[in-house]
């Protein structure tokens, strides 16, 4: 039996790593890092910086492999994601079988919270279906949603109201918006909304030196968000952002 840890490392600030996560980091002998290539090398470097900070003595192995590429232009979004998960599962199964010995503990360092908008748990179900025996433990982390609310100094929930979390591609069909957190909005769906009663709290690169925050009435600030977002994306080659949309009381 092999032990595998999914360690939430926060939204980008190494200080967001919890004591539980540090203990998990120190108990792992091998760390798996998926390299997305190109401009996103920074994401690999940030993971390495966390290891250097909390495991300065070394004594671990780092296994860095290329991440399978998902077809982001596919007409069948769900089918493309499922295919990507299957290819990732084949890769993970091979890594666990070949890079970990029996009784050894391996780990993935996952941005934010491993149970919120992260595919690793679903992929590991596919790995188990391939006959790979593993014992799994999840160490929760600070999500970008929590970091966003903290930076803007607003509570995520309001009295008596639900909080909805959804991907950007589902925003247009949401209907009336009262209190919605939007993630993975590469198409900037908020820009198509014309409701004058909505306020937006937007943030990119949360927890990092490049953090950018903008808040205000949606109609007044959405053009600025689009401009800043595009400037930052061109500068870095990638962007990770999220936002809270809320109706004025």
Image: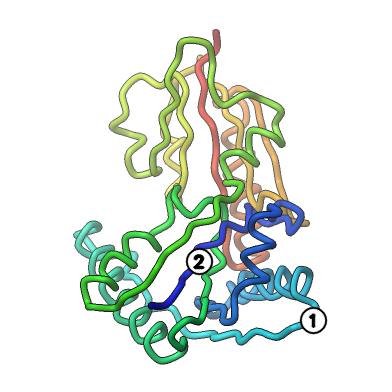
Task: Tell me what residue is drawn at x 50 percent, y 77 percent.
Answer: 34
**Vertical arrangement, residue 94 with respect to residue 8, above or below:** below
Q: In this rendering, is residue 60 above or below 28?
A: below
Which residue is drawn at the image coordinates 36% and 35% (left, top)? 171
Indicate the colouring scheme.
Answer: rainbow
Q: Residues within 10 Å of mark 2 (few under 14, many from 20)?
A: many
- Which residue does the image show at 26% across and 69% down from the upper left? 126
Q: Residue furthest top?
A: 249
- In the picture, the disc for residue 5 is 2
* Percent x, y of residue 53: 79, 70
Which of disc 1 and disc 2 is earlier in sequence? 2
Which quarter of the image is occupied by the N terminus?
bottom left
Q: Is residue 189 above or below residue 79?
A: above
What secondary structure is found at the residue carrying circle 2? strand
Q: Position of residue 141 (x, y in %)?
A: 59, 50
Percent x, y for residue 103? 47, 81
Q: Image check: 55 left or right of 216? A: right
The quarter in which the C terminus is drawn is top right
Question: Distance from label 2 to label 1 (Cα)?
Answer: 20 Å
Q: Does residue 204 lie above or below 189 as drawn?
A: below
* Res. 160 mark: none
Give the camera-side residue of 211 and 133: 133
Q: What secondary structure is marked by label 1?
A: loop
User: Residue 149 occupies which quadrant of the picture?
Assistant: top right
Local crowd size for mark 1, using a 10 Å CA cut-off: few (<14), some (14–19), many (≥20): few
Q: Nearer the viewer, residue 188 or 175?
A: 175
Q: Position of residue 62 (x, y in %)?
A: 60, 85
Q: Dot 1 corresponds to which residue?
A: 57
């Amino acid at each position: 039996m092999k032990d595998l840890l999914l360690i939430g490392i926060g939204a980008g600030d190494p200080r967001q790593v919890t004591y539980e996560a540090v203990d998990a980091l120190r108990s792992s002998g091998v760390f798996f890092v998926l390299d997305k290539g190109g401009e996103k090398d920074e994401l690999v470097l940030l993971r390495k910086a966390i290891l250097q900070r909390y495991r300065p003595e070394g004594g671990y192995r780092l296994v860095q492999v290329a991440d399978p590429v998902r077809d982001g232009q596919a007409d069948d979004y769900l089918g493309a994601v499922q295919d990507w998960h299957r290819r990732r599962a084949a890769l993970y199964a091979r890594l666990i079988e070949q890079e970990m010995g029996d009784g050894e503990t391996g780990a993935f360092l996952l941005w934010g919270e491993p149970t919120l908008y992260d595919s690793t748990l679903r992929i590991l179900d596919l790995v188990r279906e391939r006959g790979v025996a593993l014992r799994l433990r999840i160490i929760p982390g600070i999500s970008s949603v929590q970091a966003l609310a903290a930076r803007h100094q607003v509570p995520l929930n309001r009295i008596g109201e639900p909080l909805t979390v959804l991907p950007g591609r589902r925003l247009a069909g949401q209907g009336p918006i009262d209190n919605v957190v939007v993630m993975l909005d590469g198409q900037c769906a908020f820009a198509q909304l014309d409701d004058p009663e909505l306020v937006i709290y937007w943030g990119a690169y949360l927890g990092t030196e490049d953090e950018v925050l903008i808040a205000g009435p949606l109609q007044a600030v959405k053009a600025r968000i689009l401009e800043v977002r595009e400037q930052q994306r061109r500068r870095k080659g990638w962007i990770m952002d999220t936002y809270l949309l809320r109706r004025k009381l």
